[in-house]
Amino acid sequence: MKLNSIVPWGRSLAEYRAMFMLTDEDLEKSILGCSDGPASFNAELTELGGEVVSVDPVYQFSRDEIAHRIDEVAGEVLSEVEKHHDNYIWTQIPSVEALAATRMGTMSTFLKDYETGCRHGRYLNASLPQLPFAEGEFDLALCSHFLFLYSDHLDCDFHFTALKELGRIAREIRIYPLVTLDGSPSPHLPKILALLENESWQFTRQSVDYRFQKGADDMLVISTTEGI
Ligand SMILES: C[S@@+](CC[C@H](N)C(=O)[O-])C[C@H]1O[C@@H](n2cnc3c(N)ncnc32)[C@H](O)[C@@H]1O
């Protein structure tokens, strides 16, 4: 799949649960959603009483500007998926039409929550590799469809600096997927895993329930404090 830039495209709480194997107990933790963009994860989890802050550079824009940008990129994303139909597993999401309906519904939930969430400090305009949080401020940091996926856009140094930053502010980090836009394993992953060996952190690759992009069947879990 080829995209000219890093696009705003959003997934739901149910998808986050499957991508990150989130348990009910995990959802009670203080969570940082890094690169959440127009995902409805924050809106839905907040509605359930969860404690979550999302960061993304797209939050520098107004609700209407984000809605406009989503409309601009939706056609491009869906036609790329259609063009590369065989790179996806059409079981949990049965068709491109179902994908469009699911994603637009999810992003509409985000848009409805966005202005309230900004007022409450749940959507913050911030970008990796530097985030405006104190050490150990979160129990868990999640990063979906940004790190590793955009390996063609972001180099290995960026990835490692970003992981160090997430590890500074959260006790545990989970990253999904570990493949690039075309479904091949991220070329940065071997070097990143080697660099992580030199840290005092523990890490593992863990199989997940989410299935859509072929090859994207595990996440990277990093614990900065204790054994996984
Ligand atoms: C494909 S979207 C993923 C949205 C959401 N995580 C999901 O899975 O539904 C990628 C997001 O990464 C964000 N992004 C781009 N550069 C970033 C950076 N330097 N730090 C954090 N997020 C960034 C984009 O704005 C976009 O919202």
Image (cartoon, grey):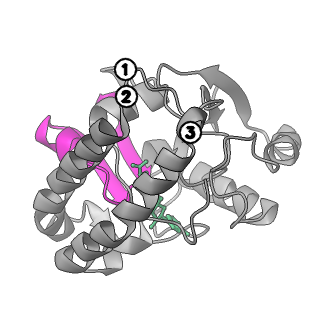
Q: Which residue is mark 1?
A: 23
Q: Is 181 on the left-hand or right-hand side of 21?
A: right
Label 3's element?
Answer: strand
Image x and y of residue 128, in percent: 57, 66
Looking at the image, which residue is at 23% across and 51% down?
104
Q: Is residue 225 above or below residue 37?
A: above
Gap between marks 2 and 3 measured at Cα:
11 Å
Q: Is 213 on the left-hand or right-hand side of 40?
A: right
Q: Which residue is mark 2?
A: 17
Type of the residue with mark 2: Arg
Instruction: Kindly tell me whether mark 1's CB lies below 8 Å from ligand 1.
Output: no
The image quadrant of residue 108 is bottom left
* Residue nearest the observer in this picture, 16 or 134: 16
* Residue nearest the observer in this picture, 219 or 184: 184
- Choose the circle earlier in sequence order: 3 or 1: 1
**Visible residue check, residue 48:** yes
Gap between marks 3 and 1 measured at Cα:
16 Å
The image quadrant of residue 91 is top left
- Choose the circle earlier in sequence order: 2 or 1: 2
Look at the image and give the residue range highlighted in magenta. 27-54
The image quadrant of residue 219 is top right
Gap between marks 2 and 1 measured at Cα:
7 Å
Q: Which residue is mark 3?
A: 176
